Amino acid sequence: MPVDPSDGPDPKRLERLEKRITEVKKTLEPGPRADEHFSQANIAWRMVIEMVSGLGIGFGIGYGLDRLFGTIPLFLVLFTFLGLAAGVRVMLRTAREVEADRLAEQSAREEGK
């Protein structure tokens, strides 16, 4: 039974085929990765590390300058406070970043409903 080339494709069959393809694609889509979203503990550890590293770097620079110049712990105290300020600043930036991500996810979920 030869197919007549003047006959075009059956639109109903093509539509059904498209629906089936999209259904199969939906079932094969991978779910969201668990490591893409940070847990509360990961965020807390990140902030602790940022604070401690700021303090440590400030302490190290201050101690090194005091040893180099032979001064009283003037630079040690000064740079420790500067390290603390830098650590707090980085922690606040991280908190703003996490909050922005959560708000974006929340608005995306609300738009999807």
Image (spheres, rainbow, N blue to C red):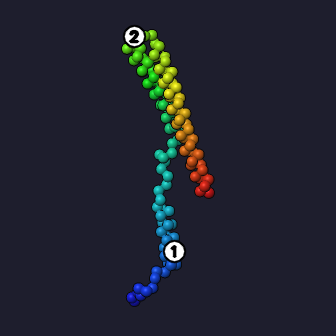
Residue picked out by circle 1: 15
Instruction: Tell whether 77 sits left or right of 112.
Output: left
Horizontal and vertical percent for residue 64?
39, 17
Q: Residue furthest left?
A: 68
Q: Residue furthest front?
A: 69
Residue in view at x 53 percent, y 30 percent: 89
Q: Is residue 82 visible?
A: yes
Instruction: Tell whether 1 sits left or right of 81.
Output: left
* Residues packed near mark 1 inside 10 Å, few (<14), some (14 to 19) or many (20 plus): few
- Numbered disc 1: secondary structure: helix
Residue in view at x 42 percent, y 10 percent: 71
What amino acid is at disc 2? Answer: Gly
Horizontal and vertical percent for residue 31?
49, 55
In what quadrant of the picture does the C terminus appear? bottom right
Residue toward you, 41 or 71 = 71
Q: CA distance from mark 2 to mark 1?
A: 83 Å
Residue picked out by circle 2: 70
